[in-house]
């Protein structure tokens, strides 16, 4: 049995580990118990059932004991003790009972102690990895603040420090075109996915994901955060333009106005954080034609015809002078509208389809 002084040192070390590594005391105790059992098994050539470990920080108790079966005739001196020998200690012992022998830590031996230390270290690493996984899984589909650690000049990939969540790589294809970063810079990223691995969490992060913009609005617009306004759909071409469809549960709350804010304050803040990316906020509607018409903003729409067939398709007529606006630069506006609404969109000028036959 350990002395009172060594007990105090042990529990002080346990408390320090908990504070320093952020590991729960119960987890540490379980790992230390397992390490001591391995050490005793190695020194005394016994099985798990022959080792009793009792650790109670609240009482300052730290005991390790050997438990042997009391038998008439000993076949294995490591796991058994004779009734005669047991009754020399206590007369009331009977066959079939367990004979408990308290052990001193120093009796574990140098090799056993090293084994215990290794298992404890391994357990601590596993615990830290487990906590990292839990930390990041709780933040999946959220925005996290990260610090740029290093930048690969050839591939353009960026290593980020996620704090307690460990680190992650922001690949070039998940970066907004035209963005530049410097070591030590603090940036916001969207956690797309978290997978537990033997080396800890594998975190997929992005600056281009539509979820980044959606989460920014949730943090900036109280009406979205409290559920009054709902983001129904979002489509994004990172660095250029985002279209977001919103709807209000409360008829007295304008969902578009709530997202824009007084004098554009809310949307402007997000546009600024995204480096000037344009954001179109659209009123979502159950009326598909009305929704498609709104989604083609800033272009004005004359009419929307939903076409028959299994594929969701429609024909949209716009004023001649609005045709290029409706299509957008390199087709961006109509492409985002299609992603937002889920419809294939055929845009035609009001005067006809460039002379082609219907």
Image (cartoon, helix red, strand yellow):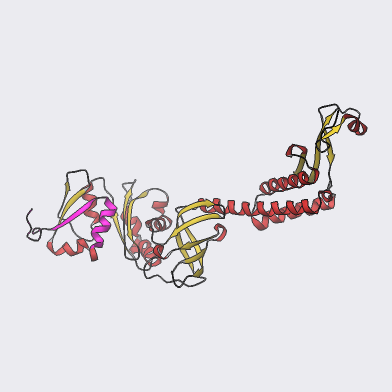
Q: Quadrant of residue 275?
A: bottom left
Q: In which quarter of the image is residue 72?
A: top right
At a point 44% along the width and 72% down the height, the residue shown is 154
Question: Is 167 placed above or below 26 here?
Answer: below
Which residue occupies the foreground of this view, 90 or 70?
70
- Regarding residue 39, the answer to whether it shows in the image is yes
Question: Is 233 placed above or below 329 here?
Answer: above
Quadrant location, the N terminus:
top right
Which residue occupies the foreground of this view, 120 or 226?
120
Which residue occupies the foreground of this view, 170 or 182?
170
- Give yes or no for residue 264 being in the magenta stretch: no
316 relative position to 162: left or right: left
At a point 21% along the width and 50% down the height, the residue shown is 290
Q: Where is residue 178 in the image (x, y as percent from the top left)?
A: 37, 71
- Give yes or no for residue 340 being in the magenta stretch: yes
Q: Residue furthest front?
A: 75
Q: Where is residue 129 in the image (x, y as percent from the top left)?
A: 59, 54
101 relative position to 183: left or right: right
Q: Where is residue 21 in the image (x, y as percent from the top left)?
A: 65, 56
236 relative position to 325: left or right: right
Question: Is 42 placed above or below 83 here?
Answer: below
Which residue occupies the foreground of this view, 146 or 76?
76
The magenta region covers 331-358
- Regarding residue 297, the answer to whether it shows in the image is no
112 relative position to 216: left or right: right
Q: Position of residue 88 (x, y in %)?
A: 93, 32
């Amino acid at each position: 049995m350990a002395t009172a002084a060594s007990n105090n040192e042990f529990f002080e070390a346990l408390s320090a580990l908990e504070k320093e590594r952020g590991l729960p005391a119960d987890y540490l105790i379980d790992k230390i118990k397992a390490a001591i059992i391995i050490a005793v098994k190695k020194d005394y050539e016994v099985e798990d059932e022959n080792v009793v470990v009792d650790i109670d920080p609240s009482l300052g108790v730290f005991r390790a004991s050997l438990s042997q079966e009391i038998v008439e005739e000993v076949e294995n001196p490591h796991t058994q003790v004779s009734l005669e020998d047991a009754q020399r200690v206590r007369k009331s012992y009977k066959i079939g009972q367990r004979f408990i022998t308290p052990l001193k830590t120093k009796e574990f031996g140098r090799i056993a102690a090293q084994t215990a230390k290794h298992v404890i270290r391994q357990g601590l690493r596993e615990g830290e990895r487990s906590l990292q996984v839990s930390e990041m899984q709780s933040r999946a589909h959220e925005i996290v603040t990260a610090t740029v650690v290093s930048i690969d000049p050839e591939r353009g990939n960026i290593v980020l420090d996620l704090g307690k969540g460990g680190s992650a790589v922001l690949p070039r294809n998940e970066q907004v075109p035209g963005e530049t970063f410097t070591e030590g810079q603090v940036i916001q990223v969207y956690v797309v996915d978290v997978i537990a691995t033997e080396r800890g969490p594998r975190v997929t992060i992005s600056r281009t994901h539509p979820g980044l913009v959606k989460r920014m609005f949730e943090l900036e617009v109280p009406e979205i955060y409290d559920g009054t306004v709902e983001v129904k759909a979002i489509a994004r071409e990172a660095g250029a333009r985002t279209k977001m469809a919103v709807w209000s549960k409360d008829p007295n709350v304008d969902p578009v106005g709530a997202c824009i804010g007084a004098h554009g304050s809310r949307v402007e803040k997000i546009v600024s954080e995204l480096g000037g990316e344009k954001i179109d906020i659209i009123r979502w509607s159950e009326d598909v034609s009305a929704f498609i018409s709104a989604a083609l903003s800033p272009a004005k729409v004359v009419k929307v015809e939903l076409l028959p067939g299994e594929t969701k398709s429609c024909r949209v007529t716009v004023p001649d002078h609005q045709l290029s606006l409706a299509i957008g630069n390199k087709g961006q506006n109509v492409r985002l509208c299609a992603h937002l609404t889920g419809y294939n969109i055929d845009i035609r000028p009001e005067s006809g389809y460039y002379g082609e036959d219907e």
